[in-house]
Image (cartoon, helix red, strand yellow):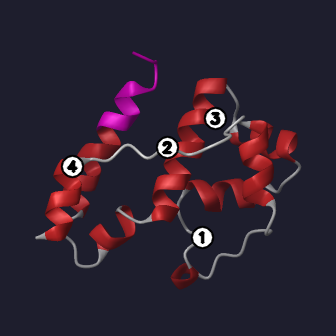
């Protein structure tokens, strides 16, 4: 168990509460949030701060923050440099993405 495991648990609990608000489930289950969570988890695993990640990737701190918050969806109007995600993936050594499906969440979306 990592020293950040409690953050994931707290975030999952917060997501359950927030899902009760209209339109939030769609956002929370979207690819932008999933990618942001993956990047944040890997960043913490590697021991980087957001600033360190931005510096190592050669991207702006704002791009890292926007991507991690899942705000790259067109509805939010946040623009990041087109190659920022690729640069961040390279620094974090994210070569491929293998989804882990949350069956419970997936079934709740389908009903």
Can residue 3 be seen here?
Answer: yes
Indicate whether 6 appears above or below 32. above
Label 4 SS: helix
Query: Residue 104 location in percent, x, y?
Result: 17, 50
Residue 43's disc number = 3
Residue 95 is inside the magenta segment: no
What residue lies at 76% left-to-right and 54% top-to-bottom? Answer: 86
Please name the residue that numbered disc 4 is placed on: 103
Please name the residue that numbered disc 1 is placed on: 72
Question: 83 and 1: which one is in front?
Answer: 83
Residue 98's disc number = 2
Precedes in sequence: disc 1 or disc 2:
1
> How much space separates mark 4 and mark 1, taking CA atoms?
25 Å
Query: Residue 73 location in percent, x, y?
Result: 55, 75
**Range covered by the magenta-colored residues:** 1-9
> How much space separates mark 3 and mark 1, taking CA atoms?
18 Å
**Residue furthest to the top:** 1
């Amino acid at each position: 168990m990592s020293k950040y495991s409690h953050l994931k648990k707290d975030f999952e609990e917060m997501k359950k509460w927030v899902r009760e608000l209209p339109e939030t489930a769609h956002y929370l289950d979207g690819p932008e949030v999933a990618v942001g969570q993956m990047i944040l988890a890997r960043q913490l695993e590697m021991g980087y701060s957001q600033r360190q990640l931005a510096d190592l990737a050669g991207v702006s701190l704002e791009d890292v923050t926007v991507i991690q918050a899942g705000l790259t969806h067109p509805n939010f109007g946040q623009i990041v440099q087109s190659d920022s995600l690729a640069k961040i993936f390279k620094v974090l050594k994210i070569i491929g993405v293998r989804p882990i499906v949350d069956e419970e969440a997936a079934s709740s979306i389908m009903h």
